[in-house]
Amino acid sequence: MLYKSADDWQAAPEKRIMLFGMSGLGKTHISTMLREAGSWFHYSVDYRIGTRHMGEFIADNLKREAMKSPLLRELLMTDSVDVKSKISFHDLSPLSTYLGKPGDVAKGGVDWAEYLTRQRQHRVAEAAAMGDTGRFIARAREIYGYPNFVCDTSGSICEIVDPEDPADPVLSALKDQVLMVWIEGGEAHAEELARRFDRAPKPMCYQDDFLLTAWAEYLAETGDSAETVDPDMFVRWTYRRALAHRAPRYRAMAENWGVTVKAEDVAKVTSDVDFVALIGKAITARG
């Protein structure tokens, strides 16, 4: 690991970490708190995906929809208007909307083949955004003078890596750049995340194998066709399976490449000092 002991971590003039785990357990909250402390650069992988690596896909999709309006079509054809997304660290709606949910188009769904294309685009984009980490560490230090760095990952990072492979290209590149920190939730957290998701189902990114299996099982269970699937029902049905699918992958990432902190302990953190101390304990616990 980047830091061999809690003492190494505490004494390091540059503290560099990567937070990973299910969305909703505190990655962005902690990253924002560290940024506001003044000495930490916050690198949001989702923001990087939505701007640099999928920005054109998102913009083209918005333009495609705008072209359906005769008025907007005429203005777009003469370059009189510009259509683009306004994505931010705390509002990733343009990216989520583009990724979409598969199923009945009349209910806001995306055609299955197109949905798979967008899933694959996202996985490529996410790997590229993770690969940009080293560049942003250098930028944070050389341009802005930030000594410390937090990489706020997407919840789907475990879908683009093989944590059991010591030569995994994404993780092996990251291990010398950042300390990887898993925010681990318990059963109560999983239930709360599922309840939140039921209230507001949102698009997610998955591995092909997991997604294709889930789709086939859902169609068999419901008797729906690809054209009649209720998009929200499918992503709700898939989410609990995703929790079970991702947990061992996150655990393997932590055991093979980093450290673990409990979500309940993260929730108690109120300052960068608290957080640095928590990471020190996690390094010691790993041994």
Image (cartoon, grey):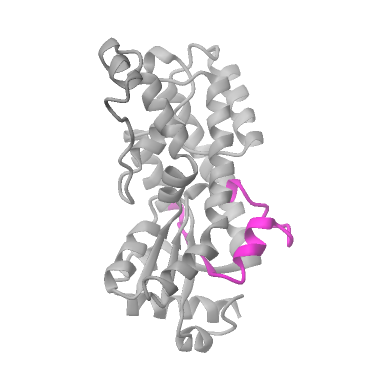
Residue 180 inside the magenta-drawn segment:
yes
Query: Looking at the image, is 225 positioned above or below residue 29?
Result: above
In front here: 223 or 92? 92
Q: Is residue 180 visible?
A: yes
The residue depicted at 52 percent of the width and 63 percent of the height is 135
Which residue corresponds to the image point at 52% horizontal and 52% vertical from the top-left? 129
| Residue 203 position by quadrant | top left
Q: Residue at x 43, y 43 (%)?
A: 50
The reply, left or right, for residue 103 in relation to residue 33 is: right
Q: Position of residue 84 (x, y in %)?
A: 33, 34
The residue nearer to you, when weighing 255 against 176, is 176
Q: Position of residue 116 (x, y in %)?
A: 57, 28
Over which residues does the magenta segment extend?
158-187
Q: How many marks?
A: 0
| Coordinates of residue 228 in the picture (x, y in percent) | 48, 11
Q: Is residue 182 left or right of residue 197?
A: right
Q: Is residue 103 left or right of residue 176?
A: left
Residue 16's place in the image compared with 193, above or below, is below
Q: Is residue 194 magenta?
A: no
Instruction: Find residue 31 and report its horizontal and vertical position in percent.
Output: 36, 63
The reply to whether residue 182 is in sight is: no
Image quadrant containing the N terminus:
bottom right
Residue under the point 61% across and 47% down: 160
Residue pushed farthest front? 78
- In the picture, measured across the screen, residue 107 lies left or right of residue 110, that is left
Q: Where does the C terminus fall, quadrant-wise?
A: bottom right
